[in-house]
Image (cartoon, rainbow, N blue to C red):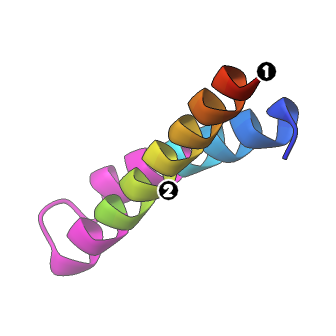
């Protein structure tokens, strides 16, 4: 995965997280989507850090 795609996905996941936080504040649906999108964002950052360290 190249950096452009990685950071584009990261931005999209953060935007989804913010939108769901605003639209579905405190509902079970909002909590589930925020947890999943947070885990995806953390995974993307960890993938970046691992690949940078390999170089």
Report which residue position mark 2 lands on.
Answer: 40
Question: Split into 4 quadrants, where in the image is the C terminus?
Answer: top right
Tell me which numbered mark, 2 or 1, is placed earlier along the sequence.
2
From the image, give the main secondary structure of the stretch colored magenta.
helix
Question: Does 5 sit left or right of 41 as displayed?
Answer: right
The part of the chain drawn in magenta is: 15-33
What residue appears at the point 62 percent right and 38 percent down from the top-left corner?
A: 11
Q: Which mark is residue 55?
A: 1
* Residue 25 lies within the magenta run: yes
Depth order, front residue of 25/32: 32
Question: Does 9 sit left or right of 55 as displayed?
Answer: left
Q: Residues within 10 Å of mark 1 (few under 14, many from 20)?
A: few
Depth order, front residue of 37/46: 46
Q: Indicate the secondary structure of the residue bearing disc 1.
A: loop
* Residue 37 lies within the magenta run: no
42 w.r.t. 24: above or below: above
What residue appears at the point 53 percent right and 44 percent down from the top-left corner?
A: 15
Question: Does 27 sit left or right of 16 as displayed?
Answer: left
x, y percentage for residue 8?
75, 39
What residue appears at the point 54 percent right and 36 percent down from the top-left corner?
A: 45
């Amino acid at each position: 995965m190249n950096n452009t795609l990685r950071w584009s996905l990261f931005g999209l996941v953060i935007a989804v997280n913010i939108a769901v936080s605003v639209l579905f504040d405190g509902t079970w649906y909002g909590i589930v989507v925020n947890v999943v999108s947070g885990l995806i964002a953390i995974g993307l950052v960890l993938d970046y850090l691992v690949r940078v360290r390999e170089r």
